Image: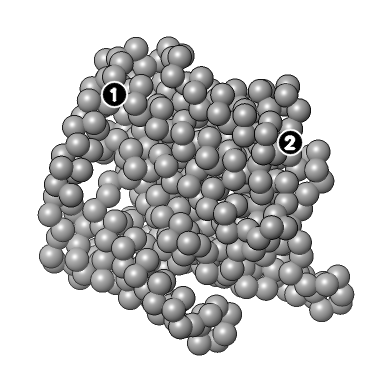
């Protein structure tokens, strides 16, 4: 284990040096987060592998793309380790592009032209594209975070393109009857109330002319629990649709802020100043990461995912991260080595998630028995990682917990 750790740190140091020589600005006060790079592709691949023989075509394409993303990540890390000319397109990047194209052609039975275009797109964006994103948005990402973001964009584009041609959509949880309609209307009204509460919180913080503390920012994590939990239990299809709309609105508002587009530009700038996180610089990535962390299990093209993996983001971000922040800042006295996070915060993180999961089991919406044992071990492991990593929690932790819970 010590040899593996030393090798990892040696590779990481060399890569960070090569990025600096290429004038690619890494997010300050953070390590490279190389281990993050494999997570999104692994999530896509495992989701496909958990499907039975009746998997959809879009699920197959996503699984094959996940395998291509894993290969691309490995090739990118290898290239960054051996070469300093990082911004240039390298011959090694053709390897994952070629293999992914062959997978589309031979396994998914796609046309040769479509397979080559999609394969080259996946291979190019997930290698050379990562470095271009870090170049044009300096200081916004660690290498691992940027890889995850780009991999997520690739999966989104592939899913959107395939959905248009296949007219694929998630199967509804309920039949189209009056009970379902009433439940959907009730949920929408409930979500509107949660939205109004969020607007009130933002308005109050802006009017106070002060920056929100970490605990105050976690208010939105609690609101996320209130929004996502009933939606995931009773109407995941409606929540799937709503989460996509909200993602588009988030990106639109952030673009309006960046280009200073009226009439909302002043309000958006005030909101950014009031709630900006220490890990945000040029763009406000923290709320986007939070939304993606909560929603991405819904976006996985599968009808065979149980509630437990679906609720992984809510569990670790809405419950665990919030409990760790509150207890750690109020009562934490024993810090983990080489970090500002406390042991008390980690214990609260674990206990909060366990209470949430066991509560769901008691009311019968998730299974008990071995599933709870596995969930307990997964929650402990992810909570320890949360205490030790300096990567963005909203991005890393939901992916990890999802992998642990779906396997």
Residue projecting furthest to the front:
106
Q: Is residue 156 above or below residue 397?
A: above
Which color scheme does this rendered protein use?
one colour
* Mark 1 residue element: helix
The residue that disc 2 covers is: 109
**In the rendered view, does 164 fall on the left or right side of 284?**
right
Question: Where residue 3 sits: x, y (%)?
Answer: 15, 42
Please name the residue shown 58% across and 31% down the image.
Answer: 100
* Mark 2 residue element: loop
Question: Where residue 207 sits: x, y (%)?
Answer: 45, 52
Are the residues flagged by discs 2 and 1 in contact, CB closer than 8 Å? no
Q: Is residue 115 above or below residue 190?
A: above
**In the rendered view, does 236 fall on the left or right side of 82?**
right
* Residue 280 or residue 1, whichever sits in front: 1
Q: Is residue 338 above or below residue 111?
A: below
Confirm whether residue 345 shows in the render: yes
Q: Is residue 362 above or below residue 171?
A: below
| Label 2 – label 1 distance at C-alpha | 35 Å
Question: Where residue 204 sits: x, y (%)?
Answer: 47, 57
Q: Which mark is residue 81?
A: 1
Mark 1 surroundings: few (<14), some (14-19) or many (≥20) residues within 10 A: many
* Residue 26 or residue 273, whichever sits in front: 26
Question: Where residue 322 sits: x, y (%)?
Answer: 37, 64
Please name the residue shown 75% across and 43% down the image.
Answer: 163
**In the rendered view, does 216 fall on the left or right side of 246?**
left
Quarter of the image for residue 134 reads: top left
Mark 2 surroundings: few (<14), some (14-19) or many (≥20) residues within 10 A: few
Quarter of the image for residue 117 reads: top right
Closer mark to the observer between disc 2 and disc 1: 2
């Amino acid at each position: 284990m010590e040899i593996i750790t030393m090798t990892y740190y040696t590779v990481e140091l060399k890569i960070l040096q090569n990025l600096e020589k290429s004038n690619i600005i890494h997010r300050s006060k953070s390590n490279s987060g190389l281990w993050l790079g494999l997570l999104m592709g692994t999530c896509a691949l495992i989701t496909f592998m958990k499907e039975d023989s009746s998997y959809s075509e879009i699920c197959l394409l996503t699984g094959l793309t996940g395998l291509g993303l894993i290969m691309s990540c490995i090739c990118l890390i290898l290239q960054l380790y051996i070469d300093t000319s990082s911004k240039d397109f390298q011959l090694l990047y053709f390897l994952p592009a070629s293999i992914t194209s062959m997978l589309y052609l031979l396994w998914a039975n796609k046309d040769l032209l479509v397979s080559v275009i999609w394969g080259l797109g996946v291979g190019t964006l997930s290698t050379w594209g990562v470095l271009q994103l870090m170049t044009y948005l300096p200081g916004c990402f660690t290498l691992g975070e940027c890889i995850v973001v780009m991999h997520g964009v690739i999966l989104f584009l592939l899913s959107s393109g395939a959905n248009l041609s296949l007219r694929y959509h998630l199967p509804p949880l309920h039949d189209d009857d009056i009970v379902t309609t009433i439940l959907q209307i009730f949920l929408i009204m409930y979500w509107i109330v949660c939205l109004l509460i969020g607007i009130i919180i933002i308005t109050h913080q802006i009017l106070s002319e002060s920056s929100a503390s970490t605990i105050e920012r976690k208010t939105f994590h609690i609101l996320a629990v209130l929004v996502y939990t009933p939606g995931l239990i009773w109407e995941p299809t409606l929540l799937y649709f709503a989460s996509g709309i909200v993602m588009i609105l988030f990106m639109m508002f952030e673009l309006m802020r960046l280009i200073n587009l009226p009439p909302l530009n002043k309000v958006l700038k005030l909101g950014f100043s009031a709630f900006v996180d220490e890990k945000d610089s040029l763009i406000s990535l923290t709320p986007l990461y939070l939304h993606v962390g909560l929603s991405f299990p819904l976006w996985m093209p599968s009808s065979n995912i149980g509630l437990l993996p679906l609720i992984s983001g809510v569990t670790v971000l809405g419950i665990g991260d919030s409990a760790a922040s509150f207890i750690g800042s109020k009562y934490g006295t024993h810090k983990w080595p080489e970090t500002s996070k406390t042991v008390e915060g980690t214990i609260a993180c674990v206990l909060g998630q366990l209470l949430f999961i066991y509560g769901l089991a008691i009311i019968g919406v998730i299974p008990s028995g071995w599933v709870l044992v596995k969930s307990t071990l997964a929650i402990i492991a992810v909570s320890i990682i949360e205490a030790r990593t300096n990567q963005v929690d909203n991005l890393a932790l939901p992916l990890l917990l999802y992998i642990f819970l779906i396997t």
